[in-house]
Amino acid sequence: MRLNLSDEPVTAELLAEALRMTGSARIAVTGISMHPTLQMGWWVYVEPLRDGDLKPGEIAVFRGERYLTVHRLVWIERHPEGDILVFRGDYNRLRERVPRSAVLGRVVAVEIPGRGRGEAKVIALENDVLSLFYRCSHALHGMLRPVLPDPAPPGTPPGPLGRILRRFLAGAERILSLFLRERR
């Protein structure tokens, strides 16, 4: 989801500075790409990362090409020149690859507005079915890495086995996202 603060790069710098100075920030949700985990009109509480400790399945704020984005970390690609983090919205099939330096913070809680004034409730984000899926698949990949073939260079299409595995994982993501519960 895009944060409708500004398309200017200074917005990301202001958020990064707020996280450095106060240790937290509160920002509005303005899109539907993370539905039902995060919904339009809600607020998310963000804390800075400590030593790049973001794990697959966690939700983070990062600098996109022209705006700030709040999406779930689904994979970490290890490269000699630095890690590339792969993000995806829960309601979105597109994946965004960003360097670790583009991540500003982790979403730790969500504020859900109530029906009346002063009835909002703040809920800490906990592991859900998708976060467990991404964490387990990343751990399984780490265990099988010694027996798996070397990954193809970036930009190279996957082979037949890679395409089958991608379709299987994409189908599993879609099915598991049906089990995400609404928070109200």
Image (cartoon, rainbow, N blue to C red):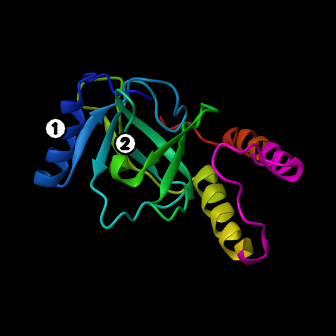
Tell me if residue 111 can be seen. Answer: yes
Q: Mark 1 highlights which residue?
A: 14
Counting residues from the N terminus, which is met first, the one under dot 1 or under dot 2? 1
In the rendering, at what x and y percent does residue 19 appear?
A: 19, 50
Is 132 located above or below residue 87 in the figure? below
In the rendering, at what x and y percent does residue 33 appear?
A: 52, 29
Write the residue at 43% across / 51% down.
125
Whether residue 134 is in magenta: the answer is: no
Q: 183 and 165: which one is in front? A: 165
Highlighted magenta segment, given as a residue range: 146-169
**Dot 2, how many residues are within 10 Å of its Cα: few (below 14), some (14-19), or many (20+)?**
many
Q: Mark 2 highlights which residue?
A: 62
Is 117 located above or below residue 94 in the figure? above
Tell me if residue 103 can be seen. Answer: no
When asked about the image quadrant of residue 27, the answer is top left
Identity, as a three-letter code, of the amino acid under mark 1: Leu
Write the residue at 81% across / 51% down.
162
Report if the CB atoms under discs 1 and 2 are less than 8 Å apart. no
When asked about the image quadrant of residue 179, the answer is top right
Question: Helix, strand or loop at disc 2?
Answer: strand
Report the residue that reaches farthest toward the left: 21
